[in-house]
Image (spheres, rainbow, N blue to C red):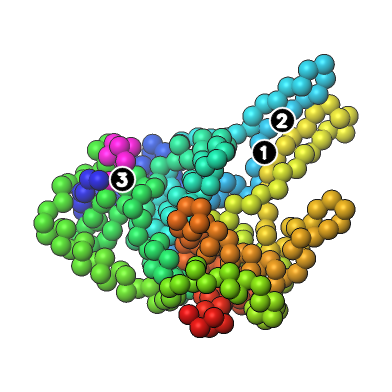
């Protein structure tokens, strides 16, 4: 990994140079308390002071909520045409936890089976990260997602009058050389970066102790009373899934022409928390109640992918806590589960 610095007086020109060469998606302020990522046409449209966005930016770019996969015609021969729309894009100003969420999706969509729609988009996406401000619900430091080690081309850390820049890929090095006045980092810059990282770690106000949680989760998995208590206020709306950077379930549907001569196959995000998620042929529902769905969600986030990949599938962004209409809180529930088995 290479390390550079970018003077803040040159930052605006750097961003505008990128906009002239790429379709840049960056955080924009859309109300007093809300930001989200949208394409920008100028530096002035961007606001890096955000603490959270409603939707995770990388997920909605790489894995859209509604995506046409293929069209087909039926006649003497069946013809299928891919509708994958991939193009060169640049995602600017994304936080470490969302980069780590994207890294998780990269593994999901490239392990065992290659999802070509996702991976084609991913190959064409350049990523420039920043040390974003954590929201009051953010617990990324508890799950090891407050720092991004990979998945970015450039990563900018504010060290006062300049940015300390980590260059993570060859594409990132090319961006730095073509679009900005980047200089080699000095020993003073390295020291300033280390001090800033120490300060940054203290910005995460929510600490969740997950020690021994994975090992003891199965002990409480069958405790029906506990899960009914935790899920009693759940509306089964699925908001927690929709705002999550790592939820990847989807449903596939066919929209068939009225003459049956063809159609379009598409996919939409699905939610393991809605009531008909487990509904199968014959009317059986293998997760018929909120308690079963909630415990499976927590198992997926905190155990299943520790077994498969050696990592949590929760990056601690806190979006589910802030989006939940019933005020269900994942870290309060973790404490309740730990208390049940006294760990």
Residue found 53% across the figure and 62% down from its top? 303
> Is 250 situated left or right of 7 in this image?
right
Residue 160 shows in this picture: no
Look at discs 3 and 1 and give the one toward the viewer: 3
Q: Which residue is mark 2?
A: 71
Q: Which mark is residue 68?
A: 1
**Which residue reaches farthest left?**
187
Residue range corresponding to the magenta coloring = 167-174
Residue at x-position 58% and y-position 61%: 300
> Marks 3 and 1, how far apart in space?
32 Å
- Left of 138 or right of it: where is 231? right
Q: Are marks 1 and 2 in contact (CB under 8 Å)?
A: yes
Q: Earlier in the sequence, mark 2 or mark 3?
A: 2
The CA span between labels 1 and 2 is 8 Å
Position of residue 130 measured from the top left corner of the image (x, y, whole percent): 35, 57
Q: Residues within 10 Å of mark 2 (few under 14, many from 20)?
A: some
Give residue 168's mark: 3
Q: Nearer the viewer, residue 290 or 326?
A: 290
* Front position in the image: 317 or 61: 317
Which element is circle 2 on? strand
Q: Residue at x 49, y 58 (%)?
A: 306
Q: Secondary structure at mark 1?
A: strand
Residue 286 appears in view: yes
């Amino acid at each position: 990994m290479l390390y550079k610095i970018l003077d803040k007086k040159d930052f605006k020109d750097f961003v505008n140079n990128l906009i002239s060469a790429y379709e840049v998606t960056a955080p924009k302020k859309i109300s007093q308390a809300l930001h989200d990522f949208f394409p920008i046409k100028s530096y002035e449209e961007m606001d890096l002071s955000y603490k959270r966005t409603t939707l995770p930016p990388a997920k909605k770019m790489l894995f859209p909520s509604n995506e046409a996969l293929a069209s087909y015609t039926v006649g003497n021969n069946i013809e299928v045409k891919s509708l994958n729309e991939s193009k060169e894009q640049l995602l600017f100003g994304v936080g470490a936890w969302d980069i780590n969420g994207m890294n998780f999706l990269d593994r999901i969509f490239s392990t065992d089976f290659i999802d070509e729609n996702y991976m084609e988009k991913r190959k064409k996406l350049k990523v420039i990260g920043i040390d974003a401000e954590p929201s009051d619900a953010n617990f990324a430091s508890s799950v090891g997602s407050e720092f991004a080690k990979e998945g970015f081309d450039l990563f900018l850390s504010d060290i006062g009058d300049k940015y300390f820049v980590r260059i993570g890929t060859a594409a990132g090095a090319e961006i730095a050389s073509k679009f900005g006045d980047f200089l080699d980092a000095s020993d003073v810059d390295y020291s300033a970066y280390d001090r800033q990282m120490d300060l940054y770690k203290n910005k995460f106000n929510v600490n969740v102790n997950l020690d021994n949680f994975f090992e003891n989760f199965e002990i409480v998995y069958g405790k029906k009373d506990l899960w009914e208590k935790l899920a009693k206020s759940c509306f089964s709306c699925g908001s927690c899934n929709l705002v999550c950077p790592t939820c990847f379930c989807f449903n596939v549907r066919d929209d068939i022409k009225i003459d049956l001569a063809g159609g379009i196959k598409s996919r939409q995000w699905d939610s393991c928390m809605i009531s008909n998620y487990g509904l199968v042929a014959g009317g059986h529902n293998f997760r018929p109640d909120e308690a079963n769905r909630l415990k499976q969600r927590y198992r997926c986030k905190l155990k299943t992918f520790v077994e498969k990949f050696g990592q949590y599938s929760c990056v601690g962004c806190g979006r589910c806590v802030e989006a939940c209409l019933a005020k269900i809180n994942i870290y309060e529930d973790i404490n309740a589960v730990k208390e049940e088995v006294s760990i």
